[in-house]
Image (tube, rainbow, N blue to C red):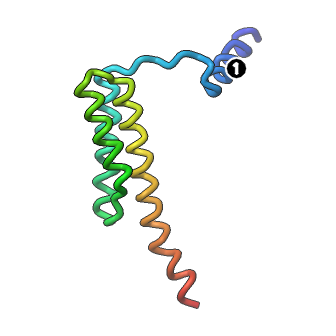
Amino acid sequence: MSMMWNTLLALVLLMTGAMPAFAASEADYKAALSAAEAAERQADQLRNKWTTTEAQLAAAKNAAAGGDFDMAAKAATEAEALAKASIFQATSEKQRWKDLEIR
């Protein structure tokens, strides 16, 4: 029972940001950047790239060039989230205009 409560407490503390973050390594950054760039390529294929995504990718690369892999990984993760949001926007709007115009 105690193990369950410890796990639950750790999970709650992690979710609230009370526990210290783990330091990102260069490998973590590269994995996050790879995922972000893949999502950005997909957004580009849908012709819906966002400038905010490009800015986050640039920030990630600049932080990595300076050796700050924590900031670089965070920026790359944010870039991936933005790219995925632009993909969602493009695909949902592809159908939504039909719902509004065609009756």
In the depicted view, which residue is nearer to us: 77 or 56? 56
| Quadrant of image for the N terminus | top right
Q: Which residue is farthest left? A: 65
Q: Is residue 2 left or right of residue 100?
A: right
Residue 83 image position (x, y, % from top left): 39, 51
- What is the total number of numbered labels drawn onto the structure image? 1
With respect to residue 11, does 50 lie above or below? below
The residue that appears at 35% across and 42% down in the rendered structure is 56
With respect to residue 40, does 11 lie above or below? above
Q: Which residue is farthest top? A: 2
Q: Name the residue under label 1.
A: 8
Q: In this view, does 67 lie to the left or right of 11?
A: left
Residue 54 image position (x, y, % from top left): 31, 49
| Quadrant of image for the C terminus | bottom right
Q: Which amino acid does label 1 sit on?
A: Leu
The residue that appears at 29% across and 24% down in the rendered structure is 27
Say which element carries label 1: helix
With respect to residue 40, does 76 lie above or below? above
Q: Residues within 10 Å of mark 1 (few under 14, many from 20)?
A: few
Res 48 quadrant in image: bottom left
Q: Which residue is farthest right? A: 1
The residue that appears at 33% across and 65% down in the rendered structure is 46
Q: Is residue 100 left or right of residue 82?
A: right
Residue 84 image position (x, y, % from top left): 42, 52
Residue 36 image position (x, y, % from top left): 34, 43
Res 17 quadrant in image: top right
